[in-house]
Image (cartoon, helix red, strand yellow):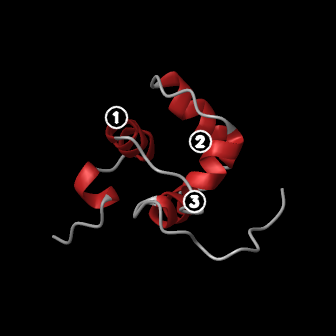
Amino acid sequence: MKHRIEPPGDKNIIGSRVLNLRKAKGMKQKEFLARLQTLGLDISPTSLSRLEGQHRLVQDYEILIIAKALEISVGELLGEKL
């Protein structure tokens, strides 16, 4: 897989967190996509890459499923400090 060469976009605030959390959990993008699909979110590899690069808007229902797939709260995904 190619490494990202363009700077992050400004379409969402969770993309970089999703990328970092996914990598911290040792999940490859394919594994994460499969987990999202089992939770009911059918997203293409390109869409996930654009989401992680902050070049794609994120729907509210997607945030819930992404947080569940990463086993974190929505607040944590949104950057809530405890």
- The tag earlier along the polypeptide, 1 or 2, is 2
* Quarter location, residue 32: top right
Residue 27 seen from this side? no
Mark closest to the chain's N terminus, 1 or 3: 3
Residue placed under numbered mark 2 in the picture:
32
Above or below: residue 6 compared with residue 69: below
Name the amino acid, label 2.
Answer: Phe
Which residue occupies 55% across, 69% down?
A: 9
Q: Is residue 13 above or below residue 70?
A: below
Q: Which residue is mark 3?
A: 55
Image mark count: 3
Disc 1 marks a residue whose amino acid type is Tyr
Tell me the kind of residue under disc 3.
His
Which numbered disc, 2 or 3, marks the residue that appears first in the sequence?
2
Which of discs 1 and 3 lies nearer the camera? The answer is 3
- Name the secondary structure under disc 2: helix
The structure residue drawn at horizontal position 50% and vertical position 66%, both measured from the top left corner, is 16
Residue drawn at the location 66% of the way across and 35% of the way down: 44
Q: Nearer the viewer, residue 21 or 1?
A: 1
Residue 1: give x, y in percent of width and height. Answer: 84, 56
Mark 1 and mark 3: Cα distance apart in space: 18 Å
Q: Which mark is residue 61?
A: 1
Label 2 vs label 3, nearer the camera: 3
Q: Position of residue 23 (x, y in %)?
A: 59, 61
| CB atoms of marks 2 and 3 within 8 Å | no
Q: CA distance from mark 1 to mark 2?
A: 17 Å
Expressed as whole percent of the image width and height from the top left, the position of residue 39 reads 45, 25
Check if mark 1's residue and mark 3's residue have beta carbons within 8 Å: no
Q: Report the Cα–Cα distance between label 2 and label 3.
A: 19 Å
- Dots 1, 2 in contact, CB < 8 A: no
Question: Mark 1 or mark 2: which is in front?
Answer: 1
Residue placed most toward the observer, 28 or 61: 61
